[in-house]
Image (cartoon, rainbow, N blue to C red):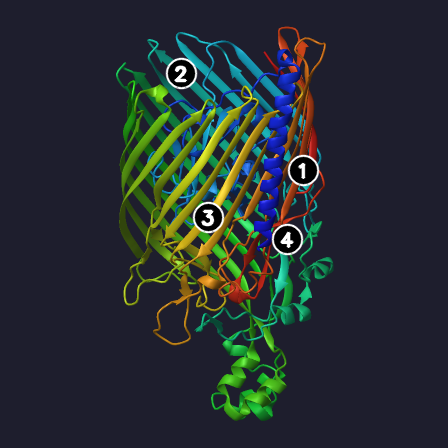
């Protein structure tokens, strides 16, 4: 029995026992003192089906996080949501301050931030789709709630939602005066301030203005950087939001929102954990068939003989799977991300039907320079064809016909040249803009809810990236392979066996996409809305067109730009049924499909004999789900459970390639095959008394790869080999869990209330690559299990004249856990490493509102 499965069973049992205990406790409380019952759980209204509904009536697995909880938890951006909903994991980016990798129900966006591949999980802000993974770590401000929809959302939310969708919904401007401000300070010299003002309705227009600023020093010391504000983990952000709303005769409204965010800082550092000694890796056998594996460069031997520019860095050059308080980044990493956008919503209720238009226009600019080895610069032997024989005895050089006799003494006396370099650093500049327009019409009768709509999306982006790497070459292999009987003699006399090839490469391309869709969904209530039966059917047809123009992919640009054009289309559907078993208890079943658009791998070679870029195919998923939603004991207990079975075809996978040009690191996306996902999810909330409440979630997923055609046979021309039996799911935690105890105690001081929360989150360790075929260190680089404890305590409602104040103390990662959370395997370059989670942070926040 897998460890994660056993743990999931135990935690499910514990969750069930806790729920039963809560039921029993509530029943005893009701029987003993019915007149002193605590107030029940608030109703949660969501718009996941394009209309306002009670969360418990929506026949899909959905979590909703309200503004109060967002503020209490100190959620700053979308990445802080990781683990708060079952089977939802969000992993930090590598070179960008705003990138995030989303995984929902085992379906991941993957680690690529290329414009050629779309996300598999949709992120929406006020109905506007955020297209690029690099911009998904957006700042959170003035949010009313976050809805997390799990499972394919291919009908109402569209393509690229095969795993699910996350929707941020902003607070509408108030027609009455409203002022809210807060400021805080914490460790690492962190401080922040935020202010939100609603002046009230003026000339029929309600407006809202918000601004926030936050900054902190780095959390790990770069010994080559004297300023703490430039150390890894340092961050400074500014965000503003302005909204205006006009009511139209009580039946409609026009609302405009502008948002702008600027995030600058030094990303968390890459830590070197593994290096190769260059031992040849023979083909492996997978289910009776041989598969070529990536050969690694002898980095260990080269580093052992290299001279470090800074002696303090030499101690850090030894690879180790341990958290480091110090790193050597000779390339002073820095990232600057700017996002801004416009959102216009127009809606009106005409009685028999409602009309809503949502227009979005968004921009994202990202510039970064990143050190991706963390050990500083070093000096060692350099390789070039012209100096291959330097230092060789003249007695051997006489056997090389191309070397004149007069030159032999000079070559024999010449030293092998050196180079000062680091293992890997990158520089990147990305520009992106997108436009979207959605128009929907909806209505309802005594027995039918319906919505139909159309969607148009356009985007264009460019990436201009430079890669500087050092590839270690064992020059003895050159002599032994090419000099026949003299090979051993040259190898024995070699003055510098291991030499570095300095490789500089550039990736420069533009990409554009256009998508159009028509959709409709209908919910029938046989026997009327009070019958307890709901039947839903919906469908969506999507047309996608994509184009990529590549100007360079390597050391030199091609003679003419390389071009790719592709078109895709797909019909997706969903069928749902809900049945109210009793008051507060309903069952539902759902079958749904989704698809992720195909695209281009920006690092793929062109098709043989052409300047055309090949494309990969769309993915498609069929999902079957059953669930129970319940609210019991006068809504003092909410207990929801779901189980699902997903079948995924044409899975697009990302991984290092086994045949990349020597000295470079590249990834490739291919359609590998078929995968089956089985899992379950539990969410619960319980009001234990007037003073205490409990909320928690549990998610488990089992992923079974049926076909994974990513193996390269050693036989030239042979078809791809199915390596499904050795594949590991990337960016996915088999088990996720979250539980929190909340407390509140009214104080005899106006509306003042003492509130506290202690929460625990668990995520199983994650692989970042699909197998050890292309990623030799895949097993060694698997992430740690993450166990985090967060806590908050404070007083709100403090009387301040006509307003109220609050003070809150908070701590994240209370135990200062140092978990390894994301990795990079550089394949043939011969080394790997990754990133650790942030250390313990804590602080105090003061706020006022009027």
Sequence-first tag of 3 and 4:
4
Q: Position of residue 184 (x, y in %)?
A: 66, 26
The quadrant the N terminus occupies is bottom right
Q: Residue, x 62% and y 14% (percent of image)?
A: 34
Element on which disc 1 rests: strand
Q: Nearer the viewer, residue 504 or 537?
A: 537
Residue named by callout 3: 678
Q: Nearer the viewer, mark 2 or mark 4?
A: 2
Sequence-first tag of 1 and 3:
3
Disc 4: CA contacts within 10 A as few (<14), some (14-19) or many (>=20):
many
Disc 3: CA contacts within 10 A as few (<14), some (14-19) or many (>=20):
some
**As displayed, is residue 394 above or below residue 102?**
below
Q: Position of residue 460 (x, y in %)?
A: 35, 42
Element on which disc 3 rests: strand
Q: CA distance from mark 4 to mark 1?
A: 31 Å
Sequence-first tag of 2 and 4:
2
Sequence-first tag of 4 and 1:
4
Residue 434's quadrant in the figure? Answer: top left
Sequence-first tag of 3 and 2:
2
Q: Nearer the viewer, residue 131 or 472?
A: 131
The quadrant the C terminus occupies is top right
Residue 814 appears anywhere in the view: yes
Element on which disc 2 rests: strand
Q: CA distance from mark 1 to mark 3?
A: 28 Å
Disc 1: CA contacts within 10 A as few (<14), some (14-19) or many (>=20):
many
Q: CA distance from mark 1 to mark 2?
A: 40 Å
Residue named by callout 4: 329
Residue named by callout 1: 789
Task: Kindly check if marks 2 and 4 are in contact, taking CB atoms under 8 A apart as contact.
Answer: no
Residue named by callout 2: 245
Sequence-first tag of 1 and 2:
2
**As displayed, is residue 627 above or below residue 201?**
below
């Amino acid at each position: 029995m897998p460890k994660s499965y056993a743990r999931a069973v135990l935690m499910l049992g514990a969750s069930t026992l806790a729920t039963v205990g809560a039921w029993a406790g509530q029943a005893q409380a009701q029987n003993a003192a019915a007149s002193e019952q605590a107030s029940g759980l608030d109703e949660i209204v969501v718009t996941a089906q394009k209309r306002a509904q009670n969360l418990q009536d929506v026949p899909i697995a959905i979590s909703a996080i309200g503004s109060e909880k967002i503020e209490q938890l100190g959620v700053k951006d979308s990445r802080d949501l990781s683990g708060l909903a079952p089977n939802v994991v969000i992993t930090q980016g590598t070179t960008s301050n705003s990138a995030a990798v989303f995984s929902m129900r085992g379906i991941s966006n993957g680690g690529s931030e290329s414009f050629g591949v779309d996300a598999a999980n949709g992120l929406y802000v006020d109905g506007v789709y955020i297209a690029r993974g690099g911009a998904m770590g957006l700042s959170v401000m003035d949010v009313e709630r976050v809805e997390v929809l799990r499972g394919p959302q291919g009908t109402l939310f569209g393509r690229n939602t095969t795993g699910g969708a996350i929707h941020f919904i902003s607070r509408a401007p108030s027609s009455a005066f409203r002022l809210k401000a807060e400021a805080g300070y914490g460790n690492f010299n962190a401080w922040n301030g935020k202010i939100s003002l609603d002046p009230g309705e003026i000339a029929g227009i309600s407006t809202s203005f918000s601004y926030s600023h936050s900054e902190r020093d780095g959390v790990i010391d770069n010994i080559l950087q004297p300023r703490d504000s430039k150390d890894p983990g340092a961050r400074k952000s500014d965000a503003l939001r302005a909204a205006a709303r006009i009511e139209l005769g009580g039946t409609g409204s026009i609302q405009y929102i502008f948002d702008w965010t600027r995030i600058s800082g030094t990303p968390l550092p890459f830590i070197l954990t593994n290096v190769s000694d260059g031992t040849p890796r023979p083909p492996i056998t997978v289910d009776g068939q041989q598969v070529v594996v990536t050969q690694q460069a002898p980095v260990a031997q080269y580093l052992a003989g290299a001279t470090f520019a800074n002696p303090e860095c030499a101690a850090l050059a030894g690879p180790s799977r341990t958290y480091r308080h110090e790193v050597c980044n000779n390339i002073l990493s820095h990232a600057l991300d700017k996002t801004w956008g416009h959102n216009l919503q127009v809606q009106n209720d005409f009685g028999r039907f409602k009309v809503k238009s949502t227009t979005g226009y968004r921009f994202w600019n990202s510039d970064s320079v990143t050190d991706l080895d963390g050990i500083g610069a070093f000096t060692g032997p350099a390789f070039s064809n012209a100096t291959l024989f330097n230092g060789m005895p003249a007695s051997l050089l006489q056997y090389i016909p191309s070397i004149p006799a007069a030159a032999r003494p000079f070559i024999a006396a010449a030293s092998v040249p050196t180079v000062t370099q680091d293992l890997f650093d990158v520089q990147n500049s990305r520009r992106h803009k997108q436009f979207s327009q959605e128009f929907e019409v909806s209505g309802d009768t005594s027995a039918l809810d319906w919505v139909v709509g159309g969607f148009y999306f356009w985007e264009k982006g460019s990436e201009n990236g430079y890669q500087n790497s050092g590839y270690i070459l064992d020059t003895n292999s050159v002599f032994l392979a090419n000099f026949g009987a003299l090979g051993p003699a040259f190898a024995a006399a070699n003055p510098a066996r291991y030499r570095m090839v300095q490789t500089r490469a550039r990736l420069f391309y533009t990409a554009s996409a256009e998508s159009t869709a028509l959709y409709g969904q209908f919910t029938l209530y046989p026997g009327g809305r009070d019958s307890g039966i709901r039947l839903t059917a919906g469908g969506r047809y999507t047309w996608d067109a994509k184009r990529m123009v590549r100007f360079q992919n390597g050391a030199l640009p091609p003679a003419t730009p390389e071009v790719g054009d592709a078109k895709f289309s797909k019909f997706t559907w969903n069928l749902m049924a809900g049945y109210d078993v009793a008051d507060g208890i309903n069952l539902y079943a759902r079958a749904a499909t989704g698809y992720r658009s195909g695209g281009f791998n920006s690092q793929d070679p062109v098709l043989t004999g052409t300047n055309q870029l090949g494309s990969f195919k769309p993915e498609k998923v069929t999902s079957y789900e059953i669930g129970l939603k319940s609210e019991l004991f006068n809504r003092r207990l909410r207990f929801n459970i779901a189980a699902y079975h997903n079948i995924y075809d044409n899975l697009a996978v990302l991984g290092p390639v086994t045949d990349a040009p020597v000295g470079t690191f590249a990834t490739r996306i291919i359609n590998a095959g078929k995968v089956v996902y089985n899992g379950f999810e539990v969410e619960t909330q319980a009001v234990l008394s007037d003073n205490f409440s409990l909320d928690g979630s549990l998610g488990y997923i089992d992923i079974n790869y049926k076909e994974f055609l990513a193996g390269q046979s050693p036989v030239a021309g042979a078809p791809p080999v199915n390596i499904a039996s050795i594949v590991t799911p990337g960016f996915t935690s088999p088990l996720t869990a979250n539980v929190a105890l909340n407390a509140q105690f009214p104080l005899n001081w106006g509306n003042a209330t003492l509130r506290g929360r202690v929460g625990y989150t668990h995520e199983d360790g994650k692989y970042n690559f699909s197998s050890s075929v292309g990623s030799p260190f895949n097993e060694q680089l698997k992430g740690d299990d993450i166990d985090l404890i967060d806590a908050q305590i404070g007083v709100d409602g403090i009387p301040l004249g006509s307003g109220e104040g609050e003070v809150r103390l908070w701590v994240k990662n209370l135990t200062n856990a140092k978990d390894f959370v994301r990795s990079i395997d550089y394949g043939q370059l011969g080394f790997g490493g990754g990133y650790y989670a942030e250390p313990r942070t804590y602080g105090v926040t003061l706020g006022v509102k009027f």
